[in-house]
Amino acid sequence: MTTRNLITDVNGVLVGNAEDQSVRTGVTALLFETPTIASCHVMGGAPGTRETDLLSPENTVEEIHGLFLSGGSAFGLDAAAGIQKVLQDQGKGFEIGPHKIPIVPGAILFDLINGGDKDWKDYSPYRDLGYEAAKSASKQFDIGSTGAGYGALVAGLRGGLGSASAKLDNGATIGALVAVNALGSPIIDDTGHFHAAAFEQNKEFGGLGYPHPMPKNADGLHIKFRDHLQAGTNTTVAVIATDMALTKAEAKRLAVVAHDGFARALWPAHTPLDGDMVFAISTGTKPRPKNMNEWIDLCALASSTMSRAIARGIYEASDSDDPNFPSWKQKFGKG
């Protein structure tokens, strides 16, 4: 099997992106070839979500048909309607009598003050962006300044959409997808070196390793515009996926441990002003973990793969016209 280093290396997962360049925002849609076990975990203090209560292990609906990550703050939740339409046209959904209702949870990030034209008229663009993203869903997709990461910003840099994957010794796959719009920084001090360097594979975000010597201010909180901070104006939203068969409760645990990847890639993470959350999905095309060692390996790789995806999203961001938030390559790429 070809490895793309994307979440779509997990069997049964498709991803599509859509952007509106004038609004400086976008949507990322995930569609599943078959109904898929899912759960989620929120650790940020200012989340924005849709249909996450049904993902709790004690609740009735076991499987979902799609997911989305979106810009637009609460307006971005409209993306689900467009994705539902695509799934409805495909005949997919939770069956209740003669009806099929596509189950499409999602999460949003705040990109309303990034300079784009947010003066839409009758309704926001997110329903149409969701439809466009879902229609384009495939195994291959772009990362960086695309989809939900198009209008994202981090501490002094342009944010982005990142993805990564890894193989377990038993042949199963784990993949991460993340829209990085964090309050904290992915960079150690002002060195250009990524906090996630310990997990990098094949120079996927520059191959710089850690700085040497480590700067004295490596533990400083490098937060942009501290005097203008407000709850909900940042967020990192993500999906961790595996083809290993898991229960809904196990998917919940996978979402919990994937948050460790945030903490290894962003400093600080999970602040009161971030809406950090992770969805976890299991497509179930590979056997269950056969023992605790395999389960722990899966959890560890969930964390490291998420860290790699975060760094890749920043590294692959396109050049910016905002001098306060240049892309990583504009600021560090020639260093």
Image (cartoon, rainbow, N blue to C red):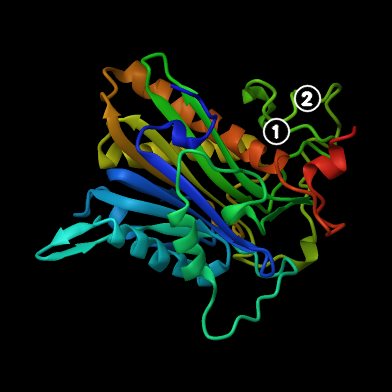
Query: In this rendering, does residue 78 appear at all?
Result: yes
Q: CA distance from mark 1 to mark 2?
A: 11 Å
Give the quarter of the figure containing the C terminus: top right
Q: Amino acid at mark 2?
A: Leu
At a point 37% along the width and 22% down the height, the residue shown is 172
Front position among marks 1 and 2: 2
Give above or below for 122 relative to 43.
below
In the figure, is residue 106 to the left or right of 198? left
Tell me the kind of residue under disc 1: His
- Disc count in the image? 2
Q: Residue 208 — which label?
A: 2
Q: Is residue 86 above or below residue 139?
A: below
Residue 103 shows up from this direction: no
Q: Provide residue 89's location: percent of width, then percent of height.
A: 30, 61
The answer to which of 300 and 152 lies nearer the viewer is 152
Q: Quadrant of residue 120?
A: bottom right
Q: Residues within 10 Å of mark 2 (few under 14, many from 20)?
A: few
Image location (x, y in percent) of residue 237: 53, 51
Q: Residue 195: which numbered mark, if any?
A: 1
Q: Residue furthest top?
A: 169
**Residues at marks 1 and 2 touching, judged by CB atoms closer than 8 Å:** no
Q: Picture quarter containing residue 100? A: bottom left
Quadrant (top left/top right/bottom left/bottom right) for the N terminus? top left
Q: Is residue 202 above or below residue 333?
A: above
Element under disc 1:
helix
Left or right: 83 in relation to 237: left
Q: Front-most of 327 and 186? A: 327
* Left or right: 26 in relation to 194: left
Q: Is residue 250 left or right of residue 74?
A: left
